[in-house]
Structure formats: C-alpha cells, structure tokens
Amino acid sequence: MTVIDATAAYPIPLAWPRLAMDLKRVDAIAIHHTVTFFLSPSATVEEEQNHIQMIHWYHLSKGWGGFAYHLISFPSGRVYLVVPLTQWGAHVHAENDHLHAVVVAGDFTDRAPVLAQQQGVAEGIRLIYAALGRQVSIRPHRSWGGTACPGDAWQSWVPGLTALVEEDAMIMVRADDGSPEVYSWGGGTILVHLDRATYDILKGQGVREVVLPAAFIDRLAAFSG
Ligand SMILES: [Zn+2]
C-alpha cells in the first residue's frame, strides 16, 4: 500500500511552533499512539479522514498549529502523510527540530496494533528514509521521557518495525514530467509499492529506477484516492 498524501487538506502555516525542518538534522523517528477510540480494520477512507480532521482540530485548539504528527497509520493498513516532512511536527517536547513522527491511531496501552497497522507504520518509515536518503533510528516517544506513549505494549511491536521496514519490497520510481500532486516527494520522485513477484523480476533485471509516463501516474493517483 502506498502512502496517501493528505497534506493539502490540513495546511499548517510555516510559523512557530511549526517551522521548516532541516532534513539534514533529522536523526530519529518517534513512534506515538493517539489514545483515541479504535477504528475497525474495515473503516472507510472517509471515516479515517474524519478522524484525522478531529485530531487536527484538537491540536489546533492546543495551540500547536494543527495535526501534530507527520504520518498516521490506521488498523486498515492505510497510512496518511498529513504534515510535510519538510515541516516540524509538534509531538516530542523541545525535540521537534530533529524528529519525524509516525502515530498509530488507537490506544495501545495494553495491546499491540494489528499487523496491517504496523505495516502502515513501516510504509511511513520507508517514505521518511526515501526523503532523507538514509536511515535513522526508530524510537518510542517514551524514550525521550515524561510519557508512556506509545503504550506499555510497545516492546511487543516497536522494535520489530525495523525488520518490517526491510521486509517488504520497495522500488523507487521517478516521474518523467514534473511533480504529480498526490505522489510528489523530493523533486518528482515517487514511491510505488510493488508486489513481491514484480519486484523480483525488476530487481533481477537490475532495475532500480523506472521512469513512468504521466498517464500512469494519474492512474496511480486515482487508485490511491
Ligand atoms: Zn507520543
């Protein structure tokens, strides 16, 4: 599953406390849980977007400028980019100038997210790695202190994210004419998540980068929407 880019729906001014992120300074990804009610794995995109909107308004009311995390993963396995990776989040006290954030929707005090939701987190982490051009450490929010986030069950799933990130096949695909609205990261570079068989074929042919025609990208955008 690809990351759904929802940044256009939740614009956050580039002003304190949501300044521009210097990607060279990013040295870790903080993993959070929302501690809100649990959406079922069969939730619709509309229900998930309503959930994002609710959190966005709540965080606005707290004076944080809007949605606090960069990415949010749902039990459906869908993962949304809500805040551009080039902007600070508002999720770890006094550390937002060098961290990206992925949050799992739900309360995971006593249990781990379902596997699909963990895979959504892994997908988000792959996007961050692609944007940074390198890997950084993956840490539970609590490792910075002052919180139990992302819940007491964190040890049963957060350390396993590293393997999940590496497990699924991924290939970088580059658009040939500018940046499509939905899949644009880093100057027209997009990520397409291929099934294992297709990946193995392309990898066997030594393909690491594919230039796609614009029409194909439009179809991808429609597929993800
Ligand atoms: Zn947290």
Image: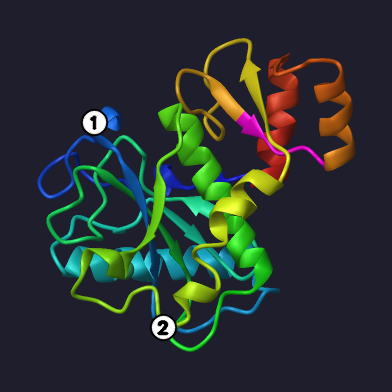
- The number of numbered discs placed on residues in the rendered structure image is 2
Instruction: Inspect this view and state whether residue 1 appears.
Output: no
Q: Is residue 48 left or right of residue 58?
A: right
Is residue 21 within the magenta segment?
Answer: no
Kind of residue sitting beneath label 1: Asp
Q: Is residue 63 above or below residue 28?
A: below
Element class at badge 2: loop
Residue range highlighted in magenta: 191-195
The residue lying toward the viewer, choosing from 217 and 143, is 143
Identify the residue under disc 1: 22
Q: Main secondary structure of the magenta part?
A: loop
Q: Is residue 66 above or below residue 107?
A: above
Q: Residue furthest bottom?
A: 110
The residue lying toward the viewer, choosing from 88 and 128, is 128
Of the numbered discs 1 and 2, the one sitting upstream in the chain is: 1
How many other residues sit within 10 Å of disc 1, few (<14), some (14-19) or many (≥20)? Answer: few
Q: What residue do we see at 69% from left, 26% from top?
A: 217
The residue lying toward the viewer, choosing from 194 and 157, is 157
Instruction: Inspect this view and state whether residue 70 appears.
Output: yes
Q: What mark, if any, has residue 152 been given in the picture?
A: 2
**For ligand 1, which image quadrant applies?**
bottom left
Q: What residue do we see at 85% from left, 31% from top?
A: 200
